[in-house]
Image: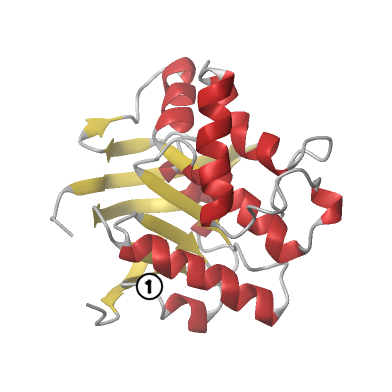
């Protein structure tokens, strides 16, 4: 880890207006995450975890404050610019996999490259290498319905990596898996962390949280605690 800041939130607040009421989902969040860190976001339901992940993933803008991604303030960018950043600098891994059922493994991994206009031969080569990396080299022509939950999540991880993103964002990535499959997927995250990927994972499971370098606990939209787990 070289200490370069990948994420910097400065006094980030997110408020939703619901009729005459206001919901303060995030309140004056200050958070810095450096390159190569593996950070778990934890806290009770309604504490702001999903809102924070949406802001970090450029799916939502702060009501107030600044979000610097790789040193660039993205909090005031246009929708088109945010879409470009999501496609080129961020990788998303979802609890429900979000695979396209009509496409096979290789094609699902290629989807982000298609939207970037990359050539077919290059896209297939990159996708094939990633399928091998996540242990699905022999399953590239299978469709999601022909895969186990753990295998589908491996496809999701490969798809998230296909653009070599600056930041990986994972939302309860083992939430739909049995314990054995979950352990395998978490092992993949350990490998990604060892290879220098910057990872932010939302989880409710303390055992998963303690695999990360840091645990950031939210409560009522505030950071209640930011602790390091003592990993090398």
Which image quadrant for residue 216? bottom left
For residue 54, say whether it is visible: no
At 69% across and 34% down in the image, what residue appears?
107
Which residue matches tag 1? 212
Q: Nearer the viewer, residue 151 or 47?
A: 151
For residue 129, say whether it is visible: yes
Q: Nearer the viewer, residue 89 or 61?
A: 89
Placement of 17 over or under 150, stated as above or below: above
Q: Nearer the viewer, residue 167 or 121?
A: 121
Placement of 16 over or under 26, stated as above or below: above
Percent position of residue 229, x then y:
30, 81
Placement of 188 over or under 17, stated as above or below: below
Colour convention: secondary structure
Percent position of residue 218, x then y:
42, 67
Percent position of residue 141, x then y:
76, 43
Left or right of 101 on screen, residue 51: left
Left or right of 11 on screen, residue 16: right
Percent position of residue 231, x then y:
26, 79
């Amino acid at each position: 880890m070289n200490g370069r800041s990948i994420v910097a939130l400065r006094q980030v607040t997110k408020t939703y207006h619901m009729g005459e009421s206001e919901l303060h989902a995030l309140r004056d969040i200050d958070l810095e995450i450096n390159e190569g860190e593996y950070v778990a976001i934890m806290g009770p339901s309604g504490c702001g975890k999903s809102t924070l992940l949406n802001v970090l993933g450029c799916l939502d803008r702060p009501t107030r404050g600044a979000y610097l991604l790789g040193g660039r303030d993205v909090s005031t960018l246009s929708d088109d610019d945010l879409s470009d950043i999501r496609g080129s600098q961020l990788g998303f891994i979802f609890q429900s996999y979000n695979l396209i059922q009509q496409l096979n493994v290789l094609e699902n991994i290629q989807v982000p490259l298609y939207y970037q206009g990359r050539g077919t031969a290059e896209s297939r080569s990159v996708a094939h290498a990633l399928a091998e990396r996540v242990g699905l080299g022999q399953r590239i022509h299978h469709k999601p319905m022909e895969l186990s939950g753990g295998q589908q999540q491996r496809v999701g991880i490969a798809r998230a990596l296909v653009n070599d993103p600056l930041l990986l964002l994972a939302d309860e990535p083992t939430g739909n898996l049995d314990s054995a499959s979950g352990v395998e997927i978490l092992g993949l995250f350990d490998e990604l962390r060892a290879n220098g990927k910057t990872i932010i994972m939302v989880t409710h499971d303390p055992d998963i949280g303690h695999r990360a370098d840091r645990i950031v606990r939210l409560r009522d939209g505030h950071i209640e605690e930011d602790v390091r787990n003592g990993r090398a």
